[in-house]
Image (spheres, rainbow, N blue to C red):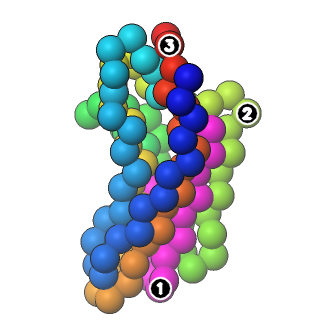
Amino acid sequence: MASRSQSAVSSANAAATVTVTGAAGQICRLYRLDAFTSAGTSTVTVSDGATVIWRSASGEATTSRLAVTWTRPLEGQPGNTMTVTGSAAGASNTVTVNAQIEQSGA
């Protein structure tokens, strides 16, 4: 079982993405995420492969931290890659995404 706390910080006017690459027979489980911007707003999405499995309200991540914790984690499908992405927050603004993701047997 590999539990990972990962962070990603975007460059100006770009998305920030945390990625856990899928592995055969393994499931990604997201326990916690937080996201914030230097200015502007960002929408956060969680994807399992090509399928969006959770999305924040539009522009919910701001300079005030958006923090979400699941008591039962969001689970992907075996072998799929999980991504947590904060959309671009506007010209000269950055986005930071932090995620606690576990990857373990199905």
Q: Is residue 11 above or below residue 8?
A: below
Is 34 magenta? The answer is yes
Residue for badge 3: 105
Tell me the kind of residue under disc 1.
Answer: Ala
Image quarter for residue 23?
top left
Q: Nearer the viewer, residue 37 or 99?
A: 99
The local secondary structure at tag 1 comes to loop
Is 32 magenta? The answer is yes
Mark 1 and mark 3: Cα distance apart in space = 39 Å
Image: magenta residue range? 30-44
Query: For residue 71, which numbered disc appears in the image?
Result: 2
Q: Please state the horizontal and vertical placement of residue 1, each as a whole percent of the image.
A: 56, 23
Query: For residue 39, which numbered disc appears in the image?
Result: 1
Q: Residues within 10 Å of mark 2 (few under 14, many from 20)?
A: few
Tell me the kind of residue under disc 3.
Answer: Gly
Mark 1 and mark 2: Cα distance apart in space = 30 Å
Question: Which of marks 3 and 2 precedes in the sequence?
Answer: 2
Tell me the kind of residue under disc 2.
Answer: Thr
